[in-house]
Image: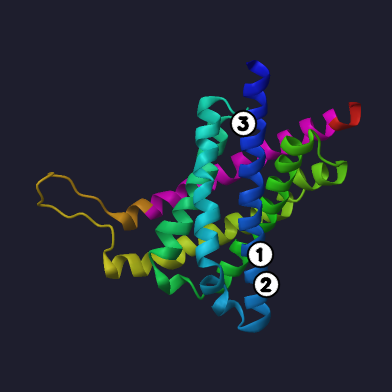
Amino acid sequence: MAGVGSAVRRLYLSAYNWVVFYGWAQVLYYAITALLGDGHEGVYAAVERPLQLAQTAAVMEILHGLVGLVRSPVTATLPQIGSRLFLTWGILWSFPETQSHILVSSLVISWSITEIIRYSFFGLKETLGFAPSWLLWLRYSTFMILYPTGIFSEVSLIYIALPYMKVSERYFLKMPNKWNFSFDYFYTCVIAIGVYIPGGPHMFTYMLAQRKKALSKAKTA
């Protein structure tokens, strides 16, 4: 039974990784096509649906960690996926004024290249039991450029959205109300920007440590 369970697990994770890989490949293709055609103003419209689907599918990775399907710590997975969902739905989708900004292009391209590499790496590991050394290197090296460009784009787009939040008062809950509770989305986003200041370097340091560990292990294998 253990062998059957392991086979089912590998089949599921293989399918999951390749399906999401295809989603991010679409995002990158549509983004580049839009950039070459209509310029950066048309990128969001071109990638909106596949971006939302591919990024929202990442919620499953939190569940994978919680139930033990993968060894990735939820404490590392949750903030990264949470911040991306926040940008995808809480900023870009919620405030259309941000969608034509050039930083949407840098955000989408940074995310999509990162995820194409990551999902193909895990897809091959689950399907074949191994991944080529060059893909291992890409998996643990490209973040040194793509993580800073992605984080900069994320923080900047939140900041750009702030005036539109204040004017529209979207997702605000004012007193008095039947719950006797108030919520200010504007200040929540200001706090979120503040969290990026220690959070970004912390995640970058964590990924550097993971890189050293993974590449050292590959050399001794």
Say which residue label 2 marks.
Answer: 32
Task: Give the Cα distance between marks 3 and 2.
Answer: 31 Å
The quarter of the displayed image where residue 111 is located: bottom right
Q: Residue at x 62, y 50 (%)?
A: 19
The magenta region covers: 189-217
Q: Which one is nearer the viewer's eye here, 111 or 129?
A: 129
- Pointer 1 and pointer 2: residues touching (CB < 8 Å)? yes
Task: Give the Cα distance between marks 3 and 1.
Answer: 25 Å
User: Residue furthest toward the right?
Assistant: 220
Say which residue label 3 marks.
Answer: 72
User: Residue furthest toward the top?
Assistant: 1
**Residue 197 is inside the magenta segment:** yes
Q: What amino acid is found at the position of numbered circle 1 in the picture?
A: Leu
Q: What amino acid is found at the position of numbered circle 2 in the picture?
A: Ile
The picture places residue 206, in percent across and down from the top left corner, at 65, 36
Pointer 1 local density, CA inside 10 Å: few below 14, some 14–19, many at least 20 = many
